[in-house]
Image: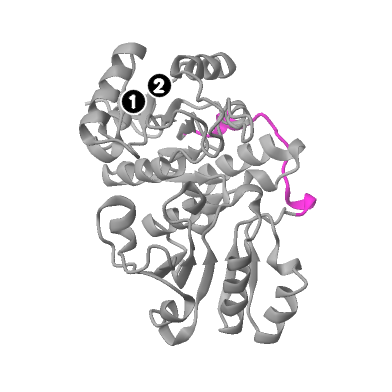
Amino acid sequence: MIPAPAIVYCATCMDSTRGKTAHGLIRFTERFDVRAVVDHVFAGQDAGTFLDGTPNGIPIVPDLSLALEKMPDKDGAFVVGLATDGGVLPDHARKAVRQAIEKGLDVYCGLHLFLSEDPEFAPLAEKHGVNLIDVRKPPHRSELHFYEGQIEEVEAVRVLVLGTDSASGKRTTSWVLRNALRDKGYTAEMIGTGQTAWLQGARFSIRLDTLVNDFVAGEIEHVVRRAWREARPDVVVVEGQGALLHPAYPGGLELVAAIKPDILLLQDVPARTTFDGFPDLPMPLMERQIAALEILSDRRVDALTINPKGLSEEASVAICAGFEKDFNRPAVDIFREGCDRLINLIESHLRTRDLTP
């Protein structure tokens, strides 16, 4: 895959979880070569520095005209980097999409509103000869797979990253773990389950919330089996969606049931006291989250992973130590300490190679 030069639109959302699609593309993408991020509120900053404190050379600019100066021959892609409640396209984003089409850019959108069916955008795109790619458009029924109960044919270690909340960093943890495994010499694939992972270029990817319910388990099983057949990895790392106890974005049970993970990781955002976007809904206690997941999966949660957003390094260390004492399992801030302890857990399940001295 040759990355396409791209502009990512994230106006007014760079500092919130509504910008998580843009955040993912700023941190990592194999599908695009991100040249600029559009957000007039935070313009003038380096996007990497803004997100993670480390510059990556991607500027945040106030408008599309300045972003186009970073593009080769004004050719490439415009990506809607918003993850709005209900998947709607705000008015300011509609204006930006219209401008991008008129400038000849292909437009990628992961929202529930389909640009290719929009009465304004569809004819405009045809006029300017550009493509409208709706990442969340449901696949045709003929392309879907029903559950077969054949997941055990996958000899790769199956790692599942679930979360205590939506927008908790499950996808980012999955990518970081996949890359760390590759750095250790293992072959590993990240299985994407949402629109952002697809936009990031996950080779093996589905979009769970585009699927008819009858086919959800089958599509999960199929994509993992396909990854095994085509790539023969030592490890597959599967990105979770939503959260098991989240009232608005429940998720996890279908992944546990279809994948039968060898390693089950639970990601938490300790700085949050309420569900993301729902200030009146308190986060359930960690012990309840673990207990619910272990009852439904009929297996132990192997480790906790920590999203340190909003924490000092000292607080992250203290929280991890407290979790390990209280729950008797590793608690890892992968951004502070790396993935070695998680990889040690994975190595004990390897079936594709013999580590015996």
- In reply to whether residue 145 is colored magenta, the answer given is yes
Q: Position of residue 17 (x, y in %)?
A: 48, 47
- In reply to whether residue 276 is colored magenta, the answer given is no
Nearer-N-terminus badge (1/2)? 2
Q: Nearer the viewer, mark 1 or mark 2?
A: 2
Tell me where residue 157 sits by quadrant.
Answer: top left
What amino acid type should be assigned to the residue bearing mark 1? Leu
Q: Position of residue 16 (x, y in %)?
A: 45, 49
Query: Which of 320/211 is in front?
Result: 320
Q: Determine the residue positioned at 54% across, 57% down.
A: 82
Query: Which of 138/187 is in front?
Result: 138
Tell me where residue 351 sits by quadrant.
Answer: top left
Specify the segment rendered in magenta: 140-155
Q: Is residue 347 above or below residue 66?
A: above
Q: Kindly indicate whether the residue at mark 2 contacts the one at mark 1 (C-beta within 8 angstroms).
A: yes
Q: Which residue, given by chain and number where applicable, does mark 1 sit on?
A: 345
Q: Quadrant of the C terminus?
A: top left
What amino acid type should be assigned to the residue bearing mark 2? Asp
Q: Which residue, given by chain and number where applicable, does mark 2 sit on?
A: 302
Q: Position of residue 149 (x, y in %)?
A: 66, 29
Query: Residue 276 shows which numbered tag?
Result: none
Q: Is residue 110 above or below residue 5?
A: above
Q: How is the image coloured?
A: one colour
Main secondary structure along the magenta-highlighted residues: loop
Element at label 2: loop
Q: Residues within 10 Å of mark 2 (few under 14, many from 20)?
A: some
Element at label 1: helix
